[in-house]
Image (cartoon, grey):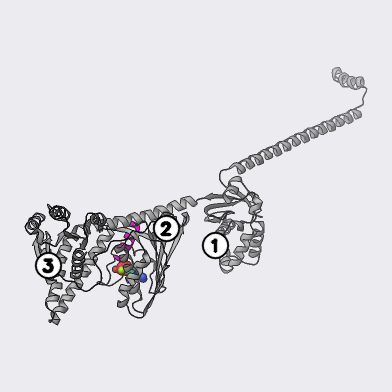
Amino acid sequence: MLVAPPALHAGVGNAASSLNVNPADFYTIAGLVAVVLLLLTLVILNQRKKSIISNTSKALEETEARYRLLFEHSPIPLMEEDLSTVKTFLDQLRAQGVADLHRYFADNPESLARCAAMVRIIDANRAALAMYGAATAGAMGQLTSVLPDDQLLQFKKELLGLVKEGGSEIVLENRTLRGDVLTVERRAVVAAGFEQSWRKVFVTIIDITEQVRLRKENKSFEKKLQQTQKLEAIGSLAGGIAHDFNNILAPIMGRAELMLIENADNAPLREHCRGIVEAAKRARDLVRQILTFSRQVDQEITPVSLDEIIREVIGLVRPTLPATIGIEYDLPDRCPRIMADATQLHQVIMNLVTNAFHAMEGNGGRLRFHLEAVSLDIRESEDLSIAPGRYVRLRIEDTGHGMDRATMDKIFDPYFTTKPRGKGTGLGLAVVLGILRGYGGEIRVESEVGGGTAFILYFPVVELAAARKPAECDRQEPLPRGTEHILLVDDEKSIADVTTGMLERLGYKVTVRISGYDALEAFRNLSDRIDLLIADLSMPQMTGLQLYREIKKIRSDIKVIICTGFSEQLDSRSARSIGIEGFLNKPVVLSDLARCVRSVLDG
Ligand code: ADP
Ligand code: MG
């Protein structure tokens, strides 16, 4: 007999019977419980999702707030721009088959301007508003409010960068709402998520105006320094030989002049003599040029009227010019005066005029002088690297052959010339520059091949009362003569000899000595018979000035002429205050000597 295990049967049967539920009901209940559980899970899940969403949006808000904070308070100017209209336009172009945007903009420049006008500035941080001088981003509106027309090419570079790489970096000029112009570094990048529309483009702008200015200033300073060093090197070399050179030149010139006088009826000989005198004069001018820019020439700085100097120079050169060259002036009557040495100014104008004539020699042309008083503000004066203030501006313009850029870069270098040997020394403009800088002025040049040349000179104005320049010894009169007794002293025997010859030619009686002591001795013996002392300034043991002081102790009314070499310093104003009337520059030319002697004797 099969007996069922009692425990199992009893268990199930007991449970069902004790709850009084049949198995079908049991499954229904279980199903319900499951549904409830499922619902519960769903509710919990939903709850969690909600909390996740709320957390995320909270985080988003925080990020946004943090971004705003950064954006607003960044010391770097930042902007958000909307380029969606530009993007649509570019997309249309592509749809029409335009593959090369670079070419397209080159062929259609007006569409570039249109694109710029489509860029809207939608936000700008405080730094950007301050930089552009705007109250709100709305006040800036379109990009074109800060983008000058001449910067469109840079904008094109930005567009091409955005198309190709989603970002760009350019350097360009921007105009502020205040009206000043800044040089800026502009970086643009399309914001994430806006790659298709370009509705949001972040822009960083860094003002580099000051850096650019400093860089430029440094460069021009370096160039100036180099030029100064060159001038100094040449100057010290030249200064060293100039004195000796002049002493050699003096007797050559003097003796040739004497031969001219003594051979009135020997035409061929006179011709040779004239040649020697001319050559010697050229050599003398050359030494003077060299010494001028090394600033070793005596200067007499007084208030000078530039217009007078210009008229004088033109008066001198006019007769030697061909009729095909016309001269025009635009010189105001009452132009302010400048502090300068009249002789140096002569040289400045002469050098520029000579260059202009050389440039117009072949075809003739027109030379124009335009003089005016100007006030330079900080910006203009910075461009010229001179102090702001009042200046006299002289523009000398010719219609000659002009120059190319490479030539223009070198014209102020000493010894740079494009002229054949004998015609150019390359010193003219170096001298002009040296003189102008010495006065705190500056020079600029504008030129074009075939289009003529203009030199623009700036001289600082002096606000000073008139100070008359004492009469010089080089007036234009016929050779005056005399019979007075002259004591001549020069330590250089060859010069003493030739000057004696000249003075005797002019009719004077000459006592000559080659040292200060000997001259003093001679004067003691002849004291009441000497009418005039002509003394070299620099002599060993006793200088011309010391000799004059000693002689004055013997006879206080003695007249004197002091001869100076180019490289010797003599403050002529203070010399005049101690009674010195006449000065002669060595090497002495016969005509100068004759006039100077006469004017001092008669004065
Ligand atoms: P130089 O006259 O002895 O050559 P400068 O220093 O006066 O020396 O001038 C240097 C160079 O500058 C000239 O050789 C010439 O090439 C150029 N130049 C100067 N002035 C002018 C001008 N007015 N027109 C054309 N070229 C000029
Ligand atoms: Mg010249």
The three-letter amino acid code for the residue at tag 1 is: Asp
Can you tell which mark lies on residue 95? none
Q: Badge 2, how many Cα within 10 Å: few under 14, some, many 20+?
A: some
Give the alpha-carbon distance from disc 3 to disc 1, as whole Å.
Answer: 69 Å
Disc 3 or disc 2, which is closer to the eye?
3
**Location of mark 3 (residue):** 498
Q: Is residue 346 magenta?
A: no
Provide the major secondary structure of the magenta segment.
helix
Give the alpha-carbon distance from disc 1 to disc 2, as whole Å.
Answer: 23 Å
> Which residues make up the magenta segment?
426-438
The percent coordinates of residue 232 (x first, y second) are 27, 56
* In the image: residue 286, left or right of residue 151: left
- Of residues 318 and 386, the one drawn nearer to the viewer in this rendering: 318
Residue at x 13%, y 79% (from the top left corner): 264
The percent coordinates of residue 463 (x first, y second) are 40, 56
Q: Is mark 3 on a helix, strand or loop?
A: helix
